[in-house]
Amino acid sequence: MTDPVLEVRGLRKHFPIRRGVLGRVAGHVRAVDDVSFSINAGETLSLVGESGCGKTTTSRCILRAITPTGGEIHFRTQDGGTVDVAALGPKQLRPLRRQMQMIFQDPFSSLNPRMTISEIIGEPLLVNGVSDTKERNRRVAELLELVQLPAAYLNRFPHAFSGGQRQRIGIARALALHPSLIVADEPVSALDVSVQAQIVNLMLDLQDRLGLAYLFVAHDLSVVKHVSHRVAVMYVGRIVEIAPTHSLFSRPRHPYTEALLSAVPVPDPRHRAKRIVLEGDVADPSNPPSGCHFHPRCRFATDRCRTEVPVLREIAPGHSVRCLLAEELGLQGVEAAA
């Protein structure tokens, strides 16, 4: 195995809660609380969980779109060195921006309607010193071909394209500066199902050709199963399980992961899925419960779960879980059910 392109250690992001006329800090929302993982070159790690669990906040901290409260974000630069992105100032971050790019969720709002496609894709090149117009247009044409769009579209505006075509333009823009890490924040959730398949297959093809590392933020586990090498499951700001895709889908080791997988449709009319409906609400990240954050909704919870805080520990090669009872539970996976 090569050194990871990205290694996150103990990442935290706490947002202050201010009250009163003077805006005194009355508490904190623990949006991301002790998150650790790594991604190798050519690998896709998917980050999944319910809305509000901290997936997008984690991805934005990694790109330094927001400043983390604590932890380390070690990124391997293209010259072979390693830097802690969390500790860098604005001037030190600028050279790294070209090596870490993002594909946004909404292809409609992520493109400037007043700019042509040539200007949108060429803007990162212009900002990074490619001032020759012909050279920029040549590179933009190459990128359009890479995402399977005709070069004749160069001078069109975003409103002339469908949602899938706009997302291809967003991908081309992200690839303009030859990045090694792409953060894809729900890149297909706003698209029709048939178009989702096209975009996902395009991203997989680009990964094979360019050796890209993907952090794939998603909630659709059917898509996640298709694109991922490994999957990390988040709950209330913490990773509760991380494992190779096949291992996690066939034999989950955390009750929350089992509940998520029970919602994945199985393409077999003879199979009637047994949906696990979690009782209660998602824990409040500003006032999480004691012990295991998931224990108020867990049907297996014991008194120990209510008082003891579980740590993320490896229970099988490459398979880690944050559950005190992981070895005792026989949980149901998608493939086993099918």
Image (cartoon, rainbow, N blue to C red):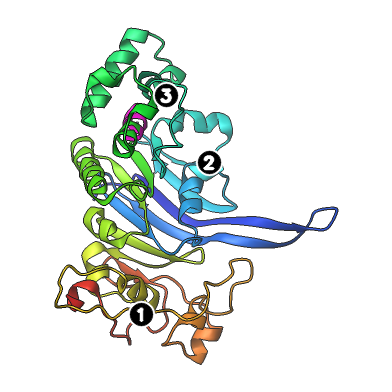
Residue on which disc 2 sits: 65
Q: Tell me which corner region of the image, top left, top right, bottom left or bottom right, holds residue 276.
A: bottom left
Identify which residue, 186 or 85, lies in the foreground: 186
> Circle 1: is it few (<14), some (14-19), or many (20+) Cα within 10 Å?
some
Is 50 above or below relative to 141?
Answer: below
Residue 171 counted in the magenta span:
yes
Measured in 3D between alpha carbons, the distance from the residue under mark 3 to the one under mark 2, in whole angstroms, is 16 Å
Magenta segment's dominant SS is helix
Q: How far apart are marks 2 and 1 (CA)?
A: 36 Å
Sequence-earlier tag: 3 or 1: 3
| Rendered view: 108 above or below 191 | above
Q: Left or right of 294: which side holds 44?
A: left
At a point 39% along the width and 38% down the height, the residue shown is 107
Q: Tag 1: residue type?
A: Ile
Circle 3 or circle 1, nearest the eye: 1
Residue hosting label 3:
124
Residue type of the residue flagged with mark 2: Ala
Q: Does 337 sit above or below residue 129?
A: below
**Label 3 packing within 10 angstroms: few (<14), some (14-19), many (20+):** some
Element under disc 1: loop
From the viewer's perspective, is the residue at label 2 or at label 1 nearer? Answer: 1
The answer to whether residue 265 of the structure is visible from this angle is yes
Magenta region: 170-177
Residue that label 1 marks: 276
Is 51 colored magenta in this rendering?
A: no
- Tell me residue 242's x, y (percent): 34, 65
Tell me which amino acid carries mark 3.
Answer: Pro
Q: Residue at x 55, y 43 (%)?
A: 87
- Coordinates of residue 192 in the picture (x, y in percent): 29, 48
Q: Upstream in the sequence, badge 2 or badge 1? A: 2
Secondary structure of residue under mark 2 = loop
